Amino acid sequence: MPRKTLALILILLALTILLVVVSLTTKQGVPTQAPVHPTATPTPLPPGHTSLMFSPSPVTLTKNQQTQVNVMIDTGGDEVRSVELEIAYDPKVLTGMTIKPGTFFPNPTVLPVGGVNTTTGRITYAITPSAFKDSAKGKGIVATLSFYPVLNASSPSTQISILSKSLVSGNVRGQNVLVKSSGTQVTLTSSTLQSQQPVVLPTVPATSPTP
Amino acid sequence: MWQRVRSDKRLLGILAVIVVLAAVPLTLQLSKHNEDIRQHAATQTSPQVCTTDQATDTMMIFDQSGSMSKATSDSDKTSRLKSAQNAANAFLDILTKRTQTPLHAVSLTVISSESRSVVKASLTTDLPKVRSAIAALSPYGDTCIECAIRNAMTNFDAHQRNNIKNVAVILTDGGATQSIGGKPDGTNTGKAAASKTALAAALDAHNKYDMAFYTIGFGDSINDQLLIDMANQTGGQYYFAPTASKLTEIYQQIAQDIGKGGITGTVYQDTNGNKGQDTTEPGLSGWTVTLTNTATNTVVATVTTDDSGVYNFTGLCDGAYQAKVTVKSGWSLTSAATQTGAVSKGSVVTSLNFGVQPTPPTPIPTNTPTPTPTPQPIAPACVATTIQPGTGSAPYTAFLHPGSTGGSGVTTQGYQWDFDGNGSWDTTTSPDAVNHTYTTAGTYSPKYRIVYTVNGSSTQLYVPCSYPFQVIVSQPPTPTPTATPIPNHTLLNLQVFLHGIGNSGDNANPNSFATSNKNPLHPTIRVTVEIYTANEPSTLVISKTLSATYDSSLGGFPASLDLGTDFPTGSYNLVIKSDRHLTKRYPQTISITSGTTRTLSPVHLIAGDVDGDNALTILDYDLISGCFSDIEAPVSCTTDNKIKTDLNDDGVVNQIDYNLFLRELSVQNGD
């Protein structure tokens, strides 16, 4: 290899080493800072922590048999003073729907709102302790639904949903602390879908509110 | 030939070595450059770190006053209105692209003269409809910002969605020159009065809907201070747009921000160390505040306070955050060094404030004997006065008498008054009782505080007091009508009845009003009337709020609505609304003939909507039960809630109110 070529390559090597050193030195001079992750979604912190759900869930209906499903509450630490349920079900699949107070509120008062509309399949139900100063927290049964499968129901399964209009008052007066509600799947056994004897439906006496 | 090939090969080899060797440092340098870009983004003030929008209900308030016909600038002869329309379209375009769910709803209300400051598009997710309404605007009239906000609120009451972030975006090219019920007044005094009512309206909207105001000043004659106050006091942001392109940028920025959360607060000099910012305590500019996401423990952004001491983080995702101020040398904190707040559903967390004061010099210890301890001074205390301010029609001069005890080792300097209870002190120190003239009808809750100094010190200190009375100022008496009716004005005579008051029963017993209160404590109420076209699609023609005063012979609240001289003849649907009552739609279509007076059948409004969401729910029940005081003291009740839950307005929340609410519950939702 000619000397000139060799010399040129050596110069270039030296230049490369110099540039690498400069580059690395400059990088170390940049102050480090925690990078921002634009796609990371922080955990939401809602004003309340209360959730509503059904138990048991899912539900399997037995022919000619009344089924009871509890509306459960988990306050997640909230002090809860009243619950307003807005529940939807399919009246073509479920019949004889009634609702009664659970055990979550001691001495509960049921407020005179809507009730069960068996035509539209909507339940509006509000429950609160009798004493204004009382509240409750923890887990428990707010209300209990009772119903039967419709004779020769057209569909083998249906949903019972807790609608977003439902409310739970707690903590600060006038504040809704409900953050989550879950519906349930109701499945009819194959025998339920066939011929079935009509059933006599029980009635639930209305509860009058007393302050 | 072979020699040349060998020479070319050598050159190619050298070139290859150059390329390979040069690539190493170049790659490193580029890599470092990219990192710099990322880190630059990380250190930007209040960066957009959230990529998802929360749903919003936005009250868009748009100036179409006469001055909007002026050229945008000397170099841009496009009218201000046209420039603003283009910019607003850019705003709607961004929101429209995010309306898959749909996420965003917008209403449009215009700023003009009082009768023309109306809702042009009801709150809707049909944003092209809002765009069409903007395109149809033409410059006209004065600048009644209060009118626009109040009318927008009425529309909001009827159409807002529950549990949604609420935002207002106001654009104006001038200062407020008119208030509700007042004449246009372009003098400094008139502008000051109109600005005050406009700010009060914005604060009402903020308190009622937790609404943040994004304010935009456009042009060369704006009232910066009003717009700054609106933004700062509601957790929003003020922008100044000197050009059309800047205005478009601002609208686009707001469209990016409104669906996300924010955190704002003030760093102030807490002179008296009471951990609250008093009116005499200034905000401090140039202080550094750092925001950390507490879930990920990462620094989100660092900002510095502006001239007012305000700092602002925008574009935040829902989550919990911690703000921390960097204390400058020579200063110490009077508040906690860190403040935490939770952004939920895109909310703007306000008032994460930091109080600081100069660190006193360290005293030099001396060997002088310990002095005899002097008794500690005792501050003066508030005493509830029994002297009532009286009532009357506007303008009404109320006699306001404070009450206090003298304290010990202190000198009482006098009193400061906040006549309208809006949180702003309206007087400097006054020696004793004062007379104040209320020019506008309304119910006012004045406050006062005792100003005193500790003997031997000139520093003024304060004791805040609550004034036990409200000042109720009614509308001035209507002039005796002349024999000749005013031609060409279209008038609607209304008779509004409120359940539980006067000759109005309740849902369960509509015709039984024996137990209803015949002497309401607040005889003047606000009634809002919305008129919609009867033909489909029904559109809002006018929305107007007026005062109605109780007529004991009628047992209700008569009111007359002047629709002006140019109201078109036609068939309309009417919606009536009053505070704490469900919205009621007239069951039948109303035919209105221009230039005539139409007397409508009485309308009875359902009571109990304490929280103003146009529905009776357990949340209203919760507030009523908290204020119930028939058997024992209320469990939990504020002064404001006491007034709201007193459904029959007799001054006490008792069994009558409770039973009335239960009887109203058969109807849960307003029309």
Image (cartoon, coloured by chain):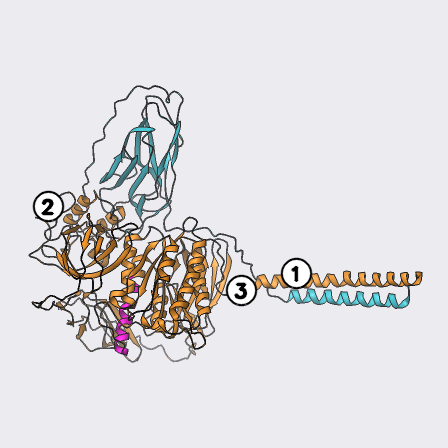
Chain colours: A cyan, B orange
> In the rendered structure, are the residues bearing label 2 and label 3 in contact, judged by CB atoms less than 8 Å apart?
no
User: First in sequence: mark 3 or mark 1?
Assistant: 1
Instruction: Please name the residue shown 46% across and 65% down the image.
Output: B249
Q: Which residues are magenta?
A: B187-204
- Name the mark nearer the viewer: 2 or 3: 2
Q: Amino acid at mark 3?
A: Thr
Where does label 2 land, which residue? B511
User: Which-is-in-front pick, marks 3 and 1?
Assistant: 1
Q: Is residue B322 visible?
A: no
Task: Assess whether residue B206 is covered by the magenta stretch.
Answer: no
Q: CA distance from mark 3 to mark 1?
A: 19 Å
Badge 1 amino acid: Ser
* For residue A180, side relative to residue B496 (left or right): right
Residue of label 3: B43
Spatial separation of the CA atoms under disc 2 and disc 1: 82 Å
The local crowd at label 1, few if under 14, some if 14 to 19, many if 20 or more residues have their Cα within 10 Å, is few
Marks 3/1 same chain: yes
Across and down, in percent, residue A22 comes to: 71, 67
Q: Nearer the viewer, mark 2 or mark 1?
A: 2
- Asked if the residues shown at circle 2 and circle 1 are in contact, with their CB atoms under 8 angstroms apart, the answer is no
Secondary structure that dominates the magenta span: helix
Numbered disc 3: what chain?
A: B
Residue linked to disc 1: B31
